[in-house]
Amino acid sequence: MHVSYNWENIPVGMRASNNRFFRHMFSQTVEYALRAVVQLAYKSPEACTTEQIAEATLVPKAYLSKVLQGLSRAGIVNSQRGIRGGMSLNRSPEELTILDVVNSVDPIQRIKQCPLGLKSHGANLCPLHRRMDESLAMVEKTFASTTLAEILAEPSSSTPLCERADQNPFIKLQAPQPQND
């Protein structure tokens, strides 16, 4: 059964294009910002050019430039001019949390009032929206307690950002040590 809606009769706040609940939980900007700061954490405290970051993170350079500007305005990254210039983290990976990055580009929006605009609900959330808000609170708490250093140090067979570590020019791989017989 196919249902069609007359979008003009649906309140603006409930239209899919305007409602956060109809989109992915995190925006593409958040994804790109996280990729960029993880890459910068790999190189910390060295600086990387926008082109180097874009290549390593598979983010379009023009979009990445805008994301980096936002991160710079928020004090997450620092832009350095000159021969050895580029972008670097303003804080060490041990101090910078995932929540710091997320909130600098697209803050997590907690549910404080009925998202449907029902006056009878107001700030008294229904069970569904209360649980959704509790889930957002858990994500916030997890991100606030997770640093970039923890992400990089976590044992895993998957390397952040790349299919294989040897494809990432910023990861220093150790050559295999010869086996003594």
Image (cartoon, grey):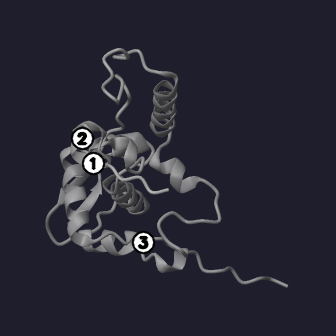
Give the Cα distance between marks 3 and 1: 51 Å
- The reply to whether residue 97 is visible in this rendering is no
Local crowd at mark 1 within 10 Å, few (<14), some, or many (≥20)? Answer: few
Q: Which residue is mark 1?
A: 6
Out of 58 and 75, give the one closest to the viewer: 58
* Sequence-first tag of 3 and 1: 1
Q: Position of residue 139 (x, y in %)?
A: 49, 37
Residue at 21% x, 63% y: name it: 65
Image-based side of 177 in relation to 168, left or right: right
The quadrant in which the C terminus is found is bottom right
Under mark 2, the amino acid is Asn
Where disc 1 sits, the SS reads: loop
Under mark 1, the amino acid is Asn
Question: Are the residues flagged by discs 1 and 2 in contact, CB closer than 8 Å?
Answer: yes
Where disc 3 sits, the SS reads: loop
Local crowd at mark 2 within 10 Å, few (<14), some, or many (≥20)? Answer: few
Q: Nearer the viewer, mark 3 or mark 1?
A: 1
* Sequence-first tag of 2 and 3: 2
Out of 137 and 39, give the one closest to the viewer: 137
Residue at 32% x, 47% y: name it: 16
- The reply to whether residue 12 is visible in this rendering is yes
Question: Are the residues flagged by discs 2 and 3 in contact, CB closer than 8 Å?
Answer: no
Out of 170 and 22, give the one closest to the viewer: 22
Q: Which residue is mark 3?
A: 170
Give the Cα distance between marks 1 and 2: 6 Å
Q: Which residue is mark 2?
A: 9
Image-based side of 152 in relation to 77, left or right: right
